[in-house]
Image (cartoon, helix red, strand yellow):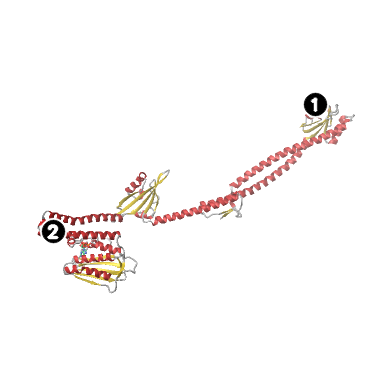
Amino acid sequence: MVSDTASKNPSLLRSPLLWRLVAINGAAVLAFLIASSGYLEVKLRSDLIREQYLDLHARARMADSALMHERGDLQLSARMLAQMAGTRLTVIAPDGTVLADSEELPARMANHAQRPEVVGAMRDGRGTDQRVSETRAAEFLYAAYRDLGRPDAPVVRVAMDGESVNRRMQAIRNTILVTVAALFVIGLALSVVAARFLVRPIQVVRNAANEIARGNLDVHVELDRKDELGELGGAFNTMSRELMLRVGQLEANKRELSAIMDNMSEGLALVDGQGNVTMANTAAARMLGLSAGSLAGRPLWESVRLPEVDELLASLPELKEPRRIWVEDHTNPHQRRVLAFVATPLFDAGRGQILAVLLISDATEDQKLLEMRQDFVANVSHELKTPLTSISAYVETLLDGASDDPNVRRPFLEKIRTNTSRLTKLVSDILTVSRLESGTGDETRTQLDLNELAAASVRRHAESAEAKNIRLSMTAADSPAMALVNEEDFLSALDNLLDNAIAYTPNGGTVEVKVSRSTQGVTVEVRDTGVGISAEALPRVFERFYRVDKARSRAMGGTGLGLAIVKHVAIKHGGRVDAESEPGKGSTFRISLPSPGSSGRLAASDRT
Ligand code: ADP
């Protein structure tokens, strides 16, 4: 909290604003004092002089009355009266001739007819003047009086030394000066108080604004006043509260965004119009084989040396829509990787394209799946083509006349039947594989005892085993081996294993089915004493259409999809399939499923 009630603020006296306000106020006070004292002096001086003239006129009038009946020595009387009145006294005839003067001999004095005070008295009865006396060489105030009622009345003039007026004026001036100085000091002190009153809240708001600028948004100013500055404090507090709220929101949004970006499995980078990366998540750096944080703040081409990506970004302004490319990454020669780049341009109304959002994902798996699918289609076409070609050849031959020969007809028709059933089995296996892969079809699972399912499959193969004089036996687990399975799928997997075991075991061999339980789950094992599989071929036997010996497989009516079906069924049930084999001795295939109690899936050992 920042408050203006804080007792002392040392920075207040260093405030330039405070001293500027004091200087302006001081100058105004001084100007006012100088103007008013000047006016006062002029006014007092004129009042003083007017008062002096009134006094001098009164004396002149008294002297005129005293001299009216004087028939003796006028000069002597003038001297006596002047002494009594304390002034110089001059009696002047209407023509300007000086008749008497208290300080000079009239004969030595010039005609006074043109003296302003004499002119005034002759005209109005009273006249005044202030000038330097020719007689006394000093400044004098002159006041003349003439009784206009008496035609022959002289002008009586009294004069007073101007110095006394000056002395009194100087005393008044001194008093004014002291008063002005005192008032100026008081005015200055009041200015400081007024300026402090203004500056302190401004400083409080300024300090709070500085705090905000330093990043501390939790600032509250406390201005305990009801004027505009108080309102300014209130508005400031509202603003800082709003700011804190907005910044908090922005930070939360930013945290959310970076959490989203950092938890994305795809790489995300924002690239500006100049090709510089402004933002990138860790996944983007990881996918491009760079260290985290090394993408942002640099041109993209500097860290990602893929011309296809440069070309992709360069094409965006023209395209104006998202574009996707796949780039094979050869940085690691041991691991083939395909990266998918999706670039989306972001446009601003006035400025055109400002950013490109680059989404990077590892498309290796997608690419593999795509290739696998393409292979599958090619394989399916090829597999279907072989029996169809042979059916069509036999049919053509029969139509060309071979049907008439009973020795040829029957074996040809049997060949057609064999190829037709191969086709049927092929189509059925293809449908099963695609159903298992796509997850469509009946997905219901029930708790079943694998002892019973295995026994059912063994029963179904008794005949074919017997035909080859193969000893088919089964060892059940000593207690029910329960598992959550889709009966049809699981039986089809077991049938495929038994089909293979009987098919690839020579006459007189042995095929053994064993169900067992462990803490991890249940296992169904099919062991035979057949031809076995070489170590190189063993990892590939679960691939679709893979056969170790194509001719033998075809001869056995195999489609090359049996073990692919087994693998998919095991995986779908959260289990796995393993194979062991020794060429010439026999093979063992094992399907392991988790028991219903255990939640986890078994680690897959073969998911190729
Ligand atoms: P097929 O329909 O050809 O039997 P599978 O997918 O079932 O196709 O098996 C793939 C290949 O694995 C077979 O062609 C065969 O070469 C080999 N194979 C499968 N089971 C056995 C086995 N029990 N003994 C020997 N080889 C086997």
Q: CA distance from mark 2 to mark 1?
A: 177 Å
**Residue at the far bottom in the pictured view:** 478
Q: Check disc 1 and report its element: helix, strand or loop.
A: loop
231 sits to left or right of 149: left
In terms of depth relative to the viewer, which is nearer, 223 or 529?
529
First along the sequence among labels 2 and 1: 1
* Residue 497 drawn above or below residue 123: below
Residue 418 x, y percent position in the rendering: 17, 60
In terms of depth relative to the viewer, which is nearer, 364 or 144?
364
* Residue 205 drawn above or below residue 32: below
Report the label total: 2
Tell whether circle 2 marks a residue whose Cβ is less than 8 angstroms from ligand 1.
Answer: no
Q: Residue at x 39, y 54 (%)?
A: 281
Q: Check disc 2 and report its element: helix, strand or loop.
A: helix
**Residue at the far top in the pictured view:** 95
Q: Residue at x 25, y 62 (%)?
A: 565
Residue 462 x, y percent position in the rendering: 20, 69
77 sits to left or right of 518: right
Residue 257 x, y percent position in the rendering: 42, 54
Quarter containing the C terminus: bottom left
Q: Tell me the amino acid under the disc marked 1.
A: Ala
In terms of depth relative to the viewer, which is nearer, 489 or 142?
489
Q: Tell me the amino acid under the disc marked 2.
A: Phe
Q: Residue at x 36, y 52 (%)?
A: 359
Where on the image, by quarter, is ligand 1?
bottom left
Residue behind mark 2: 412
Q: Which label belongs to residue 113?
A: 1
Tell whether circle 1 marks a residue whose Cβ is less than 8 angstroms from ligand 1.
Answer: no
Residue 455 x, y percent position in the rendering: 24, 70
Is residue 94 in view from this perspective? yes
